[in-house]
Amino acid sequence: MLADAAEALLETAAALHVPPLVLALEDLHWADAGTLDLLRELARDLAGTPLLVLGTHRDPPAGAATALVETARSERAETVALGPLGLADVRRYLAARGHDGVRADADRVLARSHGLPLLLEAAVAPGDAADGPADGPASTPGPDGPDGPDGIGDAAAGFVAGALDRLVPAQVGIVRAAALLGPVIDPALVAEVSGETPVAVAAAVDGGVRAGLLRGGPPRFAHALWQDAVAAGVPPVRGQELHARAAAAIAARPGAPGAPGRAARIAHHLHSAAPAPATLREAAAWSRRAADEATRALAHPEAATHLGRAARALELAGPPGVELAEALLAAARADYLAGRYPAALAGCRRAGGLGARAGRRDLVAAAALALQGVTFSEARPVITELARTALELGAEGAVESRLHAQLATMAADLGDVADAARHAARAMETARAVGDPRALLEAARAEEITAIEPWQVPRRLALGELAVVQATRLDDPIGAVLGHEWRITAGFLLGRLDVVDDATTSLGEIADRTRLPLARWHLLRVRAARATFEGRFEEALAINTEALTLALASGDTTAAGMSQALLTHVTLLRGDPDRVDHTLIEVAARVPMPLIQVALARQYLLLGDRAAARAGYEQLRPLLDHPHRDYRWGGVLVQLGDLVEAFDDPAGAALLARELHPYTRWPGAAGNATAYFTGHVGQQYGVALAVAGRPVEARAALAAAVRHDLALGGRPHVALTRLDLAALLLRTAPEAAAEAATLARDAGEQARRLGMPGPAARADALLARAEAALVARDTDPLSRREREVADLVVRALSNRQIAARLVLSERTVESHVRSILAKLGCGNRTELVVRLGSPQP
């Protein structure tokens, strides 16, 4: 891909260049999506190389660069805010450019330029200026329009007014007409549109160059701000007339009808012409052609913009009806592909309403189905209502199946398991009956989200494979992306890293090939989850930030929440209270779902606020008595172990162990490809068993979890489980103090290497306890068996009870008791109790 090639070129150049290489990029507020994606890749992949990337932007940044700039500020970048130049700066500039630099000139230049460097040369008096700005490609105004920081629009207007005063009136009209046609001046087109002769146009261009408005070779406006300021002076009626002429002239020109940018230029001029219905419909048609061209170039945001303009033109042409509904749907689909979900949802709502009023169930169904794999809170009620309306209007066959699949997805996201399962079953039954690939793909999606039981994991993997096959047949990249995501989630739990690696590679290929924001977001989420699981925390957080940037740009709050979830998970894994993100409290207040509440309670534990943590646990505890099993339930279960242990709840621990046990049959890690993976379930299962008073089973579960996480490369989880196992041994098997010491030592070393201060501190404490136990054992006159018998004597058990507990004969116990009394110098059992102390709880 082009981005990979650019990275490789820069990396090689930076390595060979002495001194370090500097890559300067100006006006990032006008950067396109491809440039921003390349910068994100550079920030992540070229860190540590001798390359300095220097970017400039308006402050505040505008357009698509906003999220990138904020990301850079929060990560590796340093930022420097530059204000306008002062009088001394202007004097130095004038002197460097060969001007006399007297105070009067400096004052005048500062007043005309407002201290903005890009306007300094233009503000120099006529005749005093040097040759003008160096030639180069003209800038293209960004989505924020001509006005940037305060005063820049006024400064441009002031300069333009002065420059136009130096032209004769006929030349002013020609230059204004040229400004409406674009930054690069086509003299023949300007002549045709303005009605002037080529000689007059040439004279006007020469005058514009002398005045500093234009520069030559080929002639173009010296800056987009000046072009905008010149165009702003065209009277509205005259402007509409010029735009109409321009559209006609460009359309009539000989040459390839599909020449790049031609349709967009014609559409632009028609949209700016007089708003007559016929003109508006023609403008919409050219916008659709421009959108097709952008789609072929994978410029999805540009395509969405063109289709949005087409829909607005048809709405103005009126009256609203089926034609407008179809245009709105086309724009909504493009917004969806561009990652603009709120705009897509609004278009679907309007299109569906128009379709329903016209009795067009096909339009209503299309509106309900346009957004796939999107479940943010604002979307659910709109999509649900549209899908139900389409079914009520009599949708059938493949469309009926797809509508039920969409309803299953919405119901599952709301936690209505029964309704989701009913719609999913209906979707799959109908899809199989009609044999439609699209219906089968979306039915698989509905069935996957309702396959929530642990024993259904192989089925979820199979559904992922089915989705990939059907999506590939349909050339549906988003369908394939979701199928690969299911493969990753199921593959992790099954311990199939070959599946995980293959699916991740496929995701990367789809994201690179299509440049779809949703595909890129899924890829980033998978990479962040994998990096976190393996203990590459800083890398995971950097990827997580990039994914958050895409989610925020899309308007999908659920997707943005995945970044918050991983951030909290990393903080809890590290056990670092200094990195706690307190916004989780606000999120839990807005979205009081158990998955967020359990994370918040664990966060309170990390902060040492046991009262708040207990309050959170008491809210969650009834769920163990009455489980509500939806697709989020597993994520709640794997976090409850810390809480039942912290608040010593044996009854709750027994219930938790019962819920977790079915997951332990799989050798891999539980989690979600778009959030994070928590390691083998045996860790939390073992903790629950220990609190429930089943230490032997707990020890086996924890040891198994260590083996499985080692096989998967889950280093943080190996360290945490070793600590749980060490604590269990010290509490229930004093004879295993040496093993506990080894476990704590290994875990502590691992935790320090990975940057996990909380587990490292816990390891140190457990190691100290284990070493103290070893010292006590070495000075103990009693053998291990004698110590076991003595502890039971202290607990007031009779010889017969001790024999039954330790599976010994009563005579053997009597022999051990005599030896114990002799070694400790006690005359009877009462003295032994006094010597060894009160029974331990």
Image (spheres, helix red, strand yellow):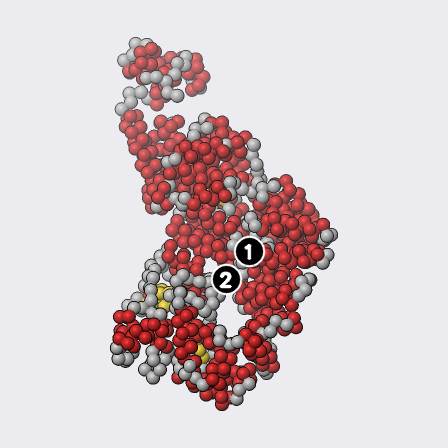
* Frontmost residue, 204 versus 489: 204
Indicate whether 514 appears above or below 612.
below
Residue at left 69%, top 52%? 390
Residue at left 40%, top 65%? 149
Left or right: 355 as drawn, with respect to 580: right
Label 2 sits on residue: 512
Spot occupied by residue 841 in the image (x, y as percentages of width and height): 39, 21
Q: 10 Å neighbourhood of mark 1: few (<14), some, or many (≥20)?
A: some
Indicate whether 191 appears above or below 313.
below
Whether residue 38 is visible, yes or no, is no
**Quadrant of the image occupied by residue 473:** bottom right
* Frontmost residue, 602 versus 789: 602
Labels 2 and 1: the sequence-earlier one: 1
Spot occupied by residue 745 in the image (x, y as percentages of width and height): 33, 38
Whether residue 762 is visible, yes or no, is yes
Residue at left 42%, top 66%? 148
Indicate whether 451 appears above or below 239.
above
Label 1 sits on residue: 342
